[in-house]
Image (spheres, rainbow, N blue to C red):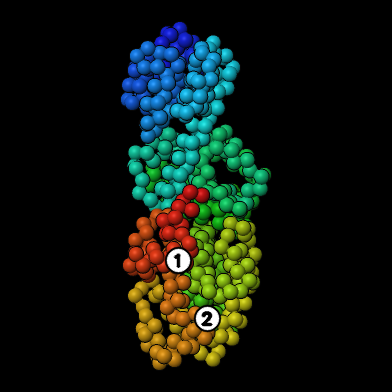
Amino acid sequence: MKLLIADDEKTIRAGLIKIIKDHYTLPLEILEAKNGEEAWKVLQEEHPDILITDIRMPKLDGIELMRLVSTLEERPVMIVLSGYDEFAYARESIRHGVQSYILKPVDKQEFLETLDRLVQDLQDQQRDKEAALLRSAMAGKVLEKDALQSLISRGSYRIVKVIRPVNLQISVFIHQYNSFVIEEKNNALVLLVPDAKRTEVFSAVQDEAVFIGSSESIRNPSDLQSCRTHADIAACVRFFKTEENNALYEVLYDEGANCSEGRSFDSLAVLIGSGDKAGIERHLQDLFSFNAESLFQNVSVLYQTLSQIPAFLVTFHQYIDADPYLAMKSFLLQDLDRYNSLAEMKKDLSDFVLYLDIILKQRYSAYPFIEQALVYVAKHFTEDISMAVVANHCSVNYTYFSEKFKLVVGVNFNEYIKQLRLEEAKRLLQQGCYKVYEVAERSGFGDVKYFMKTFKEATGLSPGDFQKRFNTQ
């Protein structure tokens, strides 16, 4: 942090420098200027964070200096020192954005209290910028390499996910443990913690948390996204019997484990509406059975399986929106951090699926081809498909298919496809790592202008504004 003292009296500059150096242990670069003209030059070249200036100075007085400062894109915070107790000076100072006005002779306590407040505000602003930078990096955004590298290079960090923190004072972690808040939700807190503070942080949160999952150390910015995933994987250890309430990814990791992909929900989705309760329950049992010898393999497969639940719910969004019970269960299942046992999670998913099966069975019984059509659409809605293609796939007359599709599903075919694509677009926008035209293409809209118009009509927000809501949280 840089600080500039502009005063034509050398003894005053020297006195302020001594007061500041005696008071602060944090690194502060203190610059000097003996008149306003020299101060303006330093401001343009060095870009200090704080300006402490006298009102009366030769060549360029403090008021004119402050006027020039107000034209800068990046302005320092300003403290004005003056021996003239006149309202006109104070009013003019405030007009140019001065934070504090202190009379000479300077009271040491008042000066330090004022400076402490400004330094703290600047530190908080810098931390907020750095936290936003980290969130963007983990969302896959392309960032200035140097800016991100300078943050990570200050020391080794790791990402820590705290499950269901109860009464954590987040400000303590920010200031006492030099940590960054990456994500804050009802049932989880994700922090970027200095490796040197890891043990202290674990000790501080263990009484307030159900479980703590920690990534390995981050060595460079390219590790951020993978380490975020590894913290999530480590946090999944809570679903398996363990005596500890925390897990480190590097301890959990098993290089020799044969890690298969997560179990697919496709077969389960096909069964919903068939009325085959026994078959549905078998699939649910398979989804939540973990018998590998390696804990790491079990945890990895579980993580990959759970990551499919949001997309699975999107497939049935029109039924969820129309039924309060399904909406409630869907709300619970979208916040997987709330669960501490597989049995609890499996019960909510089972309740959701079996209830939905009854609803769809009633609708599908007279027109079984509709179920076939919905399964096909769920797999291909992001592609260039039409009702003619789907009707042909189901071997049903186009007009008959159109009529019965609306009767069973509740909306016509094109509206149904549009809703699926809108939900997919929302999901992609929330990730924050795709440009609007990429979201249009990936969600199946293709034409970006049509996508933007349709999205605004459906949500009241442009895709860009919708995305900002999640990137700034």
| Residue 422 placement: quadrant | bottom left
Residue beneath the point at 36% across and 78% down: 385
- Element class at badge 2: loop
Residue 84 versus residue 74 in the image, above or below: above
Where does the image place residue 161, in percent across and percent down from the top left? 55, 49
Report which residue position mark 1 lands on.
457
Tell me: 160 left or right of 339.
left
Where does the image place residue 76, in percent across and percent down from the top left? 43, 28
Three-letter code, disc 2: Gly
Q: Which mark is residue 419?
A: none
Question: In front: mark 2 or mark 1?
Answer: 1
For the residue carrying disc 1, how many other residues have a C-alpha within 10 Å: few (<14), some (14-19), or many (20+)?
A: few
Residue 326 versus residue 409 in the image, above or below: above
| Residue 404 visible here | yes
Where does the image place residue 39, in percent across and percent down from the top left? 37, 19
Report which residue position mark 2 lands on.
410
Three-letter code, disc 1: Glu
Q: Nearer the viewer, residue 223 or 238?
A: 223
* Quarter of the image that includes the N terminus: top left
